[in-house]
Image: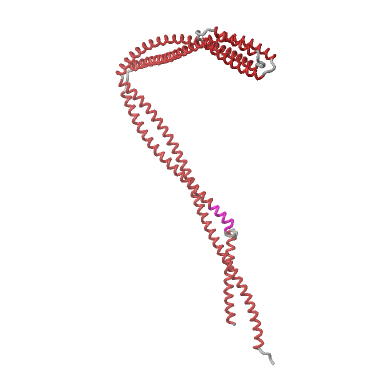
Amino acid sequence: MAASLTLSVVEIVVLLLGAIILGITIHFFITSRKNLRIPKEEPGSKADLARNEWKLKYFNDMEIKEREITALTNRVNIAEENADEFAIELEELKKTNKSLKSTIETTRQATAPDENIQQQIAALKEENRDLQEQVAYAKQVLAESNRKEQQLMRLREENDQLQQQLRSAQQHNHEEENNQSLIAGLKEQNDQLRQQLIEMSRQASSQDESAQHLIAELRAQNQQLQEELSAGKQATGEPAHPQDDYLNRLMDAKRSLLEHNQKINELLGNIEVIKEKEELQQEMAKTNEELAGQIDHMRQQLADKESEINTIRQKETLTKEMSAMLDHAYSDFNILQDKIHKLEAQLTSSRMQSLEFEDLKEEHIKLNSDIERYRQKSQSLTAENLQLQQELNITEDKLREANLQRQQLQKKVTYLEEINNDLQQVSDANKKLEGQLRRIGELESMLHLVSEERDQLMQKQQPSQHPPFS
């Protein structure tokens, strides 16, 4: 039993040593964490979320900066290509400028035109210009004369149309006058009938059905009268029909109306017919007035057209005179042109050389302007290239700083991840140590109990081994 107790004590000592070592390590890690000022948090807490957000922001910023750098490098490459192209064009323009200068010098040495011939050419050119101006003016006059002839033809056509309208209006007016005489007679008869009808309407008081029947008959007769009136209007233009038969018919109709009017009680319908006839008469009067106004307007138009025709005839005479002047000017122009051709045949060589000299001058001026323009472009491109290079250098510096920051941050992240892993290991070790400490406490309690039992046993064994003295 003593051997078993000694073994248990050795185990207890070993466990105590392990507990001391674990306590030292825990104390070391706790002090290191306090120095780093990193609070102890659970995995998946706010620190992890903030770290992940910071990582995302960092990577996004890096991508944006890389895109900017690529865009700037592309712009720099394009600017360099444009600068090379402009340099090539400048060299070509310089070569062409040199060749033009050499040709200009040769032409200056070769060309020596006579002053008298040049003066004659200038005088002939001035005369040619004057003749061309006269020809242009004559062409304008001819165009105006042609236009006026067309207007005259159009005015003549309009005059013919107006005369036809006048004839038709006069015929219509004559017919209207004849119709007005007939309408006046009918109007008098209608007035008499109206008076008789009013007197009879005052006297009448009964027989509605028979009156309506008679009104229908009277309306039919009135329609017949209207048809006869229309036939009479048509007959006014035809002299073959006599008017005596028509008057006899009207008298018979009047008599028949008088006979029927004696039997009518209420003849308001006939009054309405008479009112309609009056309205027709008023409309006829209005139309007659309108036709008279149209005739006056047409007469005024005819007078205006005649005045225009007279002016156009005067212009025709002027155009004939201008055409004669134009023929004379054309003949003079042809003579001068022949003279100019002869002089040009004599001075073709000097003229061609002078023209070539002027062309070369113009080309030289154009090339100088192109050179200046390309020079300005090259200067602007070089300035832009320098600016882009400065921006590229700035962005490269920023990229280097960002790379350094990224490396530092990556180191910090790795260090934090290692610390996090160590903390997780320490937490696991703490849990194990807590379990072992619990076991140690249990073992200590058991050892305490065992030691008490041992003491008791020792106390019991001591009196048995040493008996009392007698």
In the rendering, at what x and y percent does residue 268 appear? 65, 17
Foreground pick, 280 / 128 = 280
Foreground pick, 8 / 193 = 193
- Write down the quadrant of residue 116 in the picture: top left
Q: Which residues, given as a range, are shown in magenta? A: 44-55
Q: Residue at x 40, y 10 (%)?
A: 320
Is residue 287 covered in magenta?
A: no
- Write down the quadrant of residue 228 in the picture: top right
* The N terminus sits in image quarter: bottom right
Foreground pick, 148 / 41 = 148
In the rendering, at what x and y percent does residue 133 appear? 40, 15
In this rendering, the answer to whether 365 lies above or below 312 is below
Q: Residue at x 57, y 66 (%)?
A: 429
| Colour style of the rendered protein structure | secondary structure
Query: Position of 328 compared to 167: left or right?
Result: left
In the rendering, at what x and y percent does residue 19 appear? 58, 70
In this rendering, the answer to whether 424 lies above or below 268 is below
Is residue 50 covered in magenta?
A: yes
Question: Can you see residue 299?
Answer: no
* The C terminus sits in image quarter: bottom right
Foreground pick, 110 / 455 = 455
- Write down the quadrant of residue 253 in the picture: top right
| Dominant secondary-structure state across the stretch colored magenta | helix
Question: Can you see residue 230?
Answer: yes
In the rendering, at what x and y percent does residue 203 appear? 70, 14
